[in-house]
Image (tube, rainbow, N blue to C red):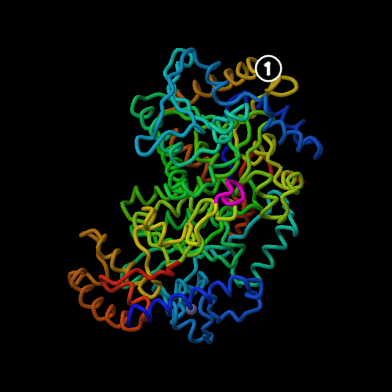
Amino acid sequence: MSRVGRNIHVSVDRLRQLAHRDARPRKIKADAGTCPKCDSHFSADEMQRNLRVCTACGHHFPVSARERLEQLGAPGGYEEMWPDLRAADPLQFTDLKPYTERIAEAEKATGMSEAIVCADLEVRHAPAVAAVMDFAFMGGSMGAVVGEKFARACDRAAQRGVPLIVVAASGGARMQEGTLALMQMAKTVIALDSLAAAQVPVIVVLAHPTTGGVWASFASLGDVTYAEPGALIAFSGPRVIEETTREVLPADFGRAERQLENGQVDAVVDRRLLAERIGRVLHILRRPDDDGPTSTQAPALQWAQGGAQWMGDAVQALPRKVMDRIRPGSPDGEDAG
Amino acid sequence: MTAPRRGGGFVRKATGKVRRASQSPDEDLWASVQMARHAERPYTLDYITRLCSDFEEVHGDRLYGDDAALVAGFGRYHDRPTAFIGQQKGRDTNERTFRNFGMAGPEGYRKAMRVMEIANRLGMPVVTLIDTPGAFPGASAEERGQGGAISRSIQMMWRLDVPTVAVVIGEGSSGGALGLGVADRVLMLENSTYAVISPEGASAILWRDASKARQAAQAFKPTAANCYRWGVVDAVVPEPEGGAHTDHDQAAGILDQYLFRTLTELGAIPASERRRARRERFRRLGPLRDPEGGIGMATGRETPPPG
Ligand SMILES: [Zn+2]
């Protein structure tokens, strides 16, 4: 495509984005299958097949914890660990609504018991324990249950001697649990050291958004840290910063691509390549004395063979704009983020 | 199920005071929040200069710069070397700006970690003094890794082999406070607060109305008495009649008694046991409903407080 053509394409996208920004309140009414960036529409089936990524523009839609686990390596289902732990209401907290009511609503709306799901998982034949957060459950906020489940997941990974995979998607500490929610930051950071004692790594995936007390605790302590494209990753959100310091922030403030430049994450990984990427790094990090199910063949060789085929297919399936970005020597997508 | 919390006789002595405070009406709660941020309240350096016979402040994180919102250094405390670290607020407009209202950035937490590492290597206890509305919310701080600086500070504090004591001396809000808060013992001054977020921040987020700070404070109940009951702090340090701001010398004198006693007690515990107990201490925090394990991993010595 000619340079002129590309420029026109970008500016049209920009205009669409701007138009949409103005119409933001209407987004609530819009179909869940409508891309907020390019207005492409997807059926529920398509969405699931696309891993909730817009095939036209690469926009990453939110993924529930359960679907994420299926995407990462448990398409046939998995057994959720400690699903019975429920939040208590230590402060008998009420803001605009009582906390207990908020929890009941979140349970009903999401069918989940809390903002995190933990399970044993195999990612591309590499065994692991996964702790996956769900933003739909009260903004993925971390209260005592999230802290406890996370800590148990760390212990379990250490005990099994397998890596921990964390997918973060959270607005931070759960305000409704007050000071005790703040303490979960310490609890989770301390629990991560169980892994250190067992000499197993932790892989962190930062989904949109990872902010506040979750970013300032376990989410920023990954041994390898991936971020999903466009994910907001920050301790203080843009609104708080603008209100406190009256700074005018760039549109891509705190976004994954920017945080990669800032040195805060190791890579920005398209969701469609995520499972492969995690599987690959787990194979690289596997210690020689570990007996995995694939140990009959050199893991690197096996990955190279299996992965090359898969990667080829995956790259073919990528939209043109993503391809432009991946191809060496091509100019960066202007409207990334 | 709940192991009795260590803390010694002085904790029990404080209980009477706590009981009284916990029965105070909402008006007193807001008064307490106000007093925690009183402009004349002693700040970190006010305490350090009174606690230590001599103090050498260090500057810079050796990576990027120095953060005046957080002071750190080595003091001579009861004729022993002791590391002191704390957020520092300013008293007049100039000083407030210079100290960035006690809101530390990543350089502050990295300077703190530098001092902790030295203290650990040289075998001296670490005392942190917490007084901050939160870590600095700024674009530059984010770019230089505010989140990672706080999480690593938490991690380093938990990993220290030396005795550690954290004292909430004024307002302790958000992860910015907890970044200095992971210690063997956490003390809290009678009129200080320890909360997940400042009342103003909470009111903007939860009530979507910045003027509901009072209501937010009442919902969070972040007083020393409540934090003690939740198991978040191990002892409440009394203040002079009328509050710490009325008499800095006396406030520092009382803190000295509690601090010295706590450090002496911690010094008698082997390092490995101290670390195990530190882990347990934080692992236990956070009540929840567990059908298998009965009601709640309880926290403090009492059930969570009623409103
Ligand atoms: Zn799209």
Chain of the residue displaying label 1? B
Q: Is the residue marked by circle 1 packed among few (<14), some (14-19), or many (20+) residues within 10 Å?
A: some
Residue segment shown in magenta: A241-247
Residue B174 coordinates in the image, percent (x, y) = 58, 44
* Viewer can see residue A169: yes
Q: Main secondary structure of the magenta part?
A: helix
Count every numbered label the image shows and give the total.
1
Looking at the rendering, which quadrant does residue B160 occupy?
Answer: top left
Residue A233 coordinates in the image, percent (x, y) = 47, 57
The residue under label 1 is B247
Residue A242 is covered by the magenta coloring: yes
Q: Would residue A136 appear left or right of A298 to someone viewing this image?
A: right
Q: Secondary structure at mark 1?
A: loop
Q: Quadrant of the N terminus of chain B?
A: top right
Q: Residue at x 64, y 26 (%)?
A: B237
User: Where A130 sits versus B175, above or below?
Assistant: below
Amino acid of disc 1: Asp
